Amino acid sequence: HRSSGPVRKAMLLKNITLSKMSEGGNVRDHISEFFQVRLEKIGLQINEDLLAILLLYSLSESCKNFRVSMESRDELPKPEKIKILEEAESRK
């Protein structure tokens, strides 16, 4: 059983905010790793808009067109929807 104390929360929050996909990296793997950080299990809630922005900006520069298309919408998509959209985009 892992601690849910301040050190653990800080480490998980740091991991998610500093997460960055390497250029040429696998988008699907990166997004899966991003979602493996289970902040809610230790009682740390992040607003869905902020989470979507963190996810979009963690993608590499080669995903810029995808990021711009998501940002140009009237509302940011839910983080889970970004995951599904990116997977569909990568299959084209």
Image (spheres, helix red, strand yellow):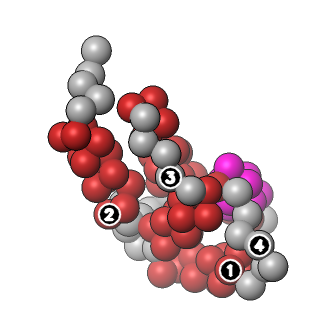
Q: Which circle's residue, 2 or 4, is located before the other in the chain? A: 2
Q: Could you tell me if residue 24 is visible in this image?
A: no
Within-10-Å neighbours for mark 2: few <14, some 14–19, many 20+: few
Q: Which circle's residue, 1 or 2, is located before the other in the chain? A: 2
Q: Which circle's residue, 4 or 3, is located before the other in the chain? A: 3
Q: Which circle's residue, 2 or 3, is located before the other in the chain? A: 2
Residue carrying label 1: 71
The label nearer to you, 2 versus 3, is 3
Label 2, label 3: how far apart the Cα atoms are: 15 Å
Whole-percent x and y of residue 5?
24, 32
| In contact (CB < 8 Å): disc 1 and disc 2 | no
Label 2, label 4: how far apart the Cα atoms are: 24 Å
Secondary-structure class at tag 3:
loop
In the image, taking residue 43 as reference, residue 89 lies left or right, namely: right
Label 4, label 3: how far apart the Cα atoms are: 17 Å
Within-10-Å neighbours for mark 3: few <14, some 14–19, many 20+: few
Please state which amino acid type lies under the numbered disc 1.
Glu
Label 4, label 1: how far apart the Cα atoms are: 8 Å
Whole-percent x and y of residue 92?
78, 65
Q: Nearer the viewer, residue 79 or 10?
A: 10
Please state which amino acid type lies under the numbered disc 3.
Ile
In the image, taking residue 38 as reference, residue 83 lies left or right, namely: right
Task: Say the numbered circle drawn on residue 18.
Answer: 2
| In contact (CB < 8 Å): disc 1 and disc 3 | no
Secondary-structure class at tag 1:
helix
Q: Which circle's residue, 1 or 3, is located before the other in the chain? A: 3
Secondary-structure class at tag 4:
loop
* Quadrant of res 71: bottom right
Task: Say the numbered circle drawn on residue 46.
Answer: 3
Residue carrying label 4: 75
Q: Which stretch is magenta?
A: 80-88
